[in-house]
Amino acid sequence: MSFLRSYDAFKGPPFAFMTSSKTSVVLSVTTWFLMVQLCLGQHRALLGTTPNIKHIVVGRCYNYITLINATSRHDCEDIWRHFEEAVVRQSSCNVTMEDYHHMFRAMTQTWPCNRFLFWSKTRTLMHSYAAVMRHFWTLEDTLVGYMFNDLIWCGRERDSGFDFSACPEWSACRNHPVYSLWKLASQNFAEMACGNITVLLNGSIHHAFSRKSMFGSVELDYLNPQRVDYVNIKVVTSLEGPSVESCHQGSVVDLIQILQARGFRWTCTDNDQTLMILQCIQKSRQSSYQTCINSLFLRENPVSN
Ligand SMILES: *[C@@H]1O[C@H](CO)[C@@H](O)[C@H](O)[C@H]1NC(C)=O
Ligand SMILES: *[C@@H]1O[C@H](CO)[C@@H](O)[C@H](O)[C@H]1NC(C)=O
Ligand SMILES: *[C@@H]1O[C@H](CO)[C@@H](O)[C@H](O)[C@H]1NC(C)=O
Ligand SMILES: *[C@@H]1O[C@H](CO)[C@@H](O)[C@H](O)[C@H]1NC(C)=O
């Protein structure tokens, strides 16, 4: 299970009940559903702090400041100390964004404009895109994102260590230690964004833009129209479809309205060619690349910006 931005989907209501006249059917379905939820819940609750977290976090930090950005001057031991201060001796549901302020102060970075890439529900594609378009920066390329990607942690009250046996789910806490860190990291990342920024959305699902996603609930609100020249939205559908939302349809239209109301300039592109070709490359083990590309250009005609 991936914890970086699994928050992307975490806030939605866990149950969507159906109505039916056949009460017994509903009951058995409901029971089954609850059992599945329970098992899932138990399974998730069993995930404690990632083993060896200190070595991973400090090691990633040294990797970053030594090999990835040799010009950055950060004190990795100091960052770890602030991290520990924020998390240990706290009940596992009681770590706020404020608790991380000292740590974030030790990790400040500035990025050049025109390179910020935001995304929602397009994680795999985003990774290929950022790898190919090397100038893009995502949250995972910042020091904090790099260091804490995919890790889990929580503390224990009256205990100077981490809880390695079990951490609560995000949805079970108001101030989950993992969520608070990502929320603050996302806020900072959005606040720093300048020049042209790119937003990658998934056109194959309903609510491609969701107010419950990290982009919709945090990042969007912290983007500054004085610093951002253009918000360039790219809506991309999966190769095999379906095509549910686009620049002219569904929640993307709501996003555009919000941007407009806040004084942002914007563009919106459906199925950007580079993104579609990238998907063909990703898929090319199953079908031949050429067939994939051909089908792309065949289906491109009816779709236009
Ligand atoms: C949560 O943390 C605050 C300050 O860090 C503390 O005053 C409060 O008692 C804690 N609450 C719980 C339930 O642990
Ligand atoms: C490295 O970090 C410095 C200062 O934070 C930043 O200006 C520069 O763009 C970064 N370079 C790379 C290649 O990450
Ligand atoms: C869109 O979301 C679906 C469902 O989560 C996923 O299977 C698909 O890979 C996503 N498409 C893109 C282009 O990211
Ligand atoms: C910013 O985006 C606008 C609209 O897409 C484009 O015309 C302009 O060239 C872009 N500027 C930079 C610096 O990329």
Image: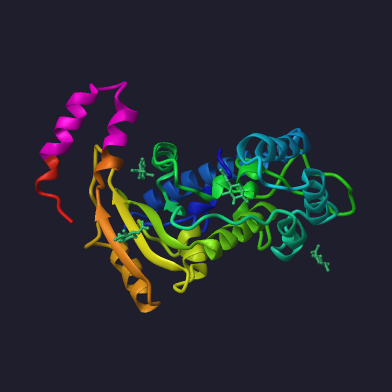
Instruction: Say above or below: 271 vs 195.
Output: above
Q: Does 144 appear in magenta? A: no
245 or 83: which is nearer to us? Answer: 83
Q: Is residue 180 above or below residue 47?
A: below
Question: Picture quarter containing residue 66?
Answer: top right
From the top left corner, tell me how far across and down residue 65 is, in percent: 68, 40
Q: Is 277 on the left-hand or right-hand side of 106?
A: left
Front in this rendered view, residue 107 or 32:
107
Magenta-highlighted stretch: main secondary structure? helix
For the point 68% across and 61% down, the residue is 175
Q: Residue at x 17, y 26 (%)?
A: 291
x, y percent for residue 114: 43, 56
Asked if residue 296 lies in the magenta stretch, the reply is: yes
63 with respect to 23 (left or right): right
Looking at the picture, how far across and down is residue 107, in whole percent? 70, 53
The quarter of the picture where the N terminus appears is top right
Q: Is residue 97 visible?
A: yes
Ligand 1, by image quadrant, is bottom right
Quadrant of the drawing holding the C terminus: bottom left
Question: Residue 298 versus residue 50: which sits nearer the camera?
Answer: 298
Q: Which residues are magenta?
A: 277-298
Picture residue at 73% right of the left edge, 60% below the top: 105
* Lateral position of residue 210 relative to residue 40, left or right: left
